Every structure is written in C-alpha cells, then in structure tokens.
Amino acid sequence: RPGEYMSAYEDEHGTYIMNSKDLRAVQHVERMVQMGLHSLKIEGRTKSHYYVARTAQVYRKAIDDAVAGRPFDKSLMDTLESLAHRGYTEGFLRRHVHDEYQNYEYGYSISDRQQFVGEMTGERRGDLAEVIVKNRFALGDSIELMTPQGNLTFDLKHLEDQKGKARDVAPGDGHVLFLPVPENVNLEHALVMRNLTSGNTRGA
C-alpha cells in the first residue's frame, strides 16, 4: 500500500525480503469442513518426503476429527513443530502485520525436536529390519518409527551392519543397517526419526 513499508534484513548469507514462513492451517480445518471444503492441498515442493508424510498424517487426523464432530486435537500443533520449518504463519486465514508473514532470520528450514534419519526398506532379518540411513543416529537415541498405520517410539538398543556386525552408530547417508522392529509392524513406506534432546537440525 502507498506509504507502507516492509522490513528487509541482511546477513552474511544474503537478504531476506521474499522469505515466506511456512503456512500452518491445521487449527482451521474444522472451520474449513464446516464451510463445505472437500479437499486440502499440502504444498511441499521444496520439502522432503518425510515432511509431506508427517504433514499428511496430521491433517488426515484433523479432517477425520472434524468430520466426526470431535474437538480439535491441539497436540497436532506440537507435531508440526517437530518438523524442520522456517517459522509458521496462518497466512491470510487471519489478519497479520507484514512482518508475521516473513522470516528475516534465516532462509532454511530448522527443527529443534526431530530429525529424519532413515527409510525402512521392508526387508527383515529375524527381529531386525533394514534401514537406509539418511542422517546420523546412534545407540541410546530416542527413535520414532512413522508408518501409515501409526507411530512407534523406542530407545535404540541395537544396530547391525549387513554382515551382522554390531554397530554403535549409523554414520550418515549412504549406509544400510539393521535395527530391532517388532515383526507385527508393517514397514511399507515407514520412515525413521531421531528425537532431539538438545541442539537443532542445523547443527545435528
């Protein structure tokens, strides 16, 4: 608008002027259902498939709850906080000042709660299951296994390589290891996250 200015900030990485925060509208799903909306689209072109899977899981529950007449589950907001993001905004679903739309501190997504660390292949070796490692994790870490059927959280107590040798650490991208997973868990499309106890994904 004439005479209305937007802030611009610059650091050693560049200028943050068109650096939108991520839209979070899960708290408005009930109202959208009441308005008669039949579908929601999640934008994730610059995000990982983990981000898309977790977000779809959250919004699916919010939609199911709204259709069933159940109250909004506020824990869904916390679940989205665990994703790497650039700060959240409700966009034009609620009136804001300009600064609330933009992130002027950094141009990357960051999380201080969880990090995506692996993909399950579905291959099993007894009570162990194969994981393609994407980021470092180690024995003693709190791990969450996300599947379309539900999520499982456990402390990692054992790791093996493809030769059956015990390992203390999954070093990072490119490694294939085995970890304990109950045999009744369907591992199709399953993803592995590490729960962070300190720091964030930028320094992980």
Image (cartoon, helix red, strand yellow):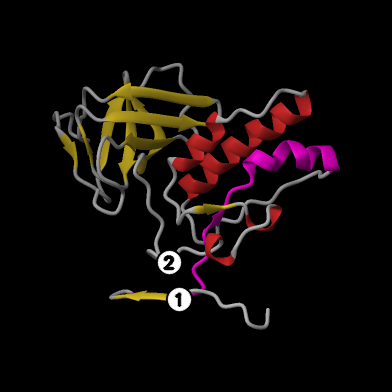
Q: Residue furthest bottom?
A: 2
Q: Are marks 2 and 1 in contact (CB under 8 Å)?
A: yes
* Local SS, label 1: loop
Looking at the picture, how far across and down is residue 168, in whole percent? 14, 32
Q: Assess disc 1: are there few (<14), some (14-19) or many (≥20) residues with their C-alpha within 10 Å of its C-alpha.
A: few
- Point out the stretch of residues depicted in magenta: 14-36
Q: Secondary structure at mark 2?
A: loop
Q: Quadrant for residue 179, please give it.
A: top left
Q: Position of residue 138 (x, y in %)?
A: 20, 34
Amino acid identity at mark 2: Tyr
According to the picture, the residue beneath numbered tag 1 turns out to be 8
Near-viewer residue (169 or 51): 51
* Residue at x-position 76% and y-position 46%: 39
| Figure check: 15 above or below 156 | below
The residue beneath circle 2 is: 104
Tell me, yes or no, whether the highlighted magenta stretch contains residue 23: yes
Q: Is residue 33 visible?
A: yes
Is 133 in front, or is 112? 112
